[in-house]
């Protein structure tokens, strides 16, 4: 029972890496306004990443330390995919706001991607 529980937690944590925060390493384009706000945006996304690292580190460390008393203390580790997702959504909002407002890059809507009748 205990080994199955640990395997489930390991699999869930591996799936949580899909929601990692992506930090921009290059500006979206080289206009003056886009470059002016690039470092500010990068700093904001890095702060979200640091919050993610600190909260996940605390949850995992405390859960593993307390698991010596009982395996039920490993349950908080199951919250790590939610923490990843929440922080990824926050960083994606920051990046899309920077790209649309400062860099002039319009995001594609799902309505724009409909196949044309000639593409059939």
Image: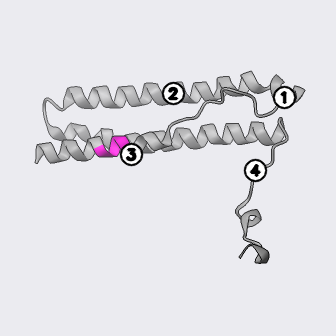
Q: Are marks 3 and 4 in contact (CB under 8 Å)?
A: no
Residue at image location 83% in from the left, 39% down from the top: 101
Whether 13 is among the magenta residues is yes
**What predominant SS class does the magenta segment belong to?**
helix
Q: Is residue 94 left or right of residue 63?
A: right
Question: Which circle's residue, 1 or 2, is located before the other in the chain?
Answer: 1
- Label placed on residue 30: 1
Mark 3 burial class by Cα count in 10 Å: few <14, some 14-19, many 20+:
few
Determine the residue positioned at 39% across, 45% down: 15
Q: Please check the rendered image and state whether residue 14 is part of the magenta-colored stretch, yes or no.
A: yes
Determine the image quadrant of residue 55: top left
Asked which quadrant contains residue 73, the reply is top left
Tell me the SS state at disc 4.
loop
Q: Disc 4 vs disc 2: which is toward the camera?
A: 4
Residue bounds of the magenta highlight = 11-15
Q: Nearer the viewer, mark 1 or mark 2?
A: 1
Q: CA distance from mark 4 to mark 2?
A: 27 Å
The dot on residue 107 is: 4
Residue 72 percent coordinates (x, y):
19, 41
**Residue designated by label 3:** 15
Q: Earlier in the sequence, mark 2 or mark 3?
A: 3
Q: Is residue 32 above or below residue 73?
A: above
Q: In the rendered image, which residue does mark 2 sit on?
A: 51
Residues marked 1 and 4 touching at CB (< 8 Å): no
Q: Residue furthest left?
A: 1
Whole-Å distance between the Cαs marked 2 and 3? 20 Å
């Amino acid at each position: 029972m205990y080994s199955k529980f640990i395997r489930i937690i390991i699999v869930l944590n591996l799936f949580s890496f899909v929601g990692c925060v992506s930090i921009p390493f290059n500006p979206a384009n080289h206009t003056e306004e886009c470059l002016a706000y690039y470092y500010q945006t990068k700093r904001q996304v890095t702060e979200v990443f640091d919050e993610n690292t600190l909260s996940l580190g605390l949850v995992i460390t405390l859960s593993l330390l307390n698991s010596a008393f009982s395996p039920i203390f490993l349950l908080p580790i199951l919250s790590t995919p939610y923490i990843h997702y929440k922080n990824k959504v926050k960083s994606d909002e920051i990046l899309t706001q920077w790209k649309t407002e400062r860099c002039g890059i319009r995001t594609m809507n799902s309505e724009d991607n409909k196949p044309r009748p000639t593409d059939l």
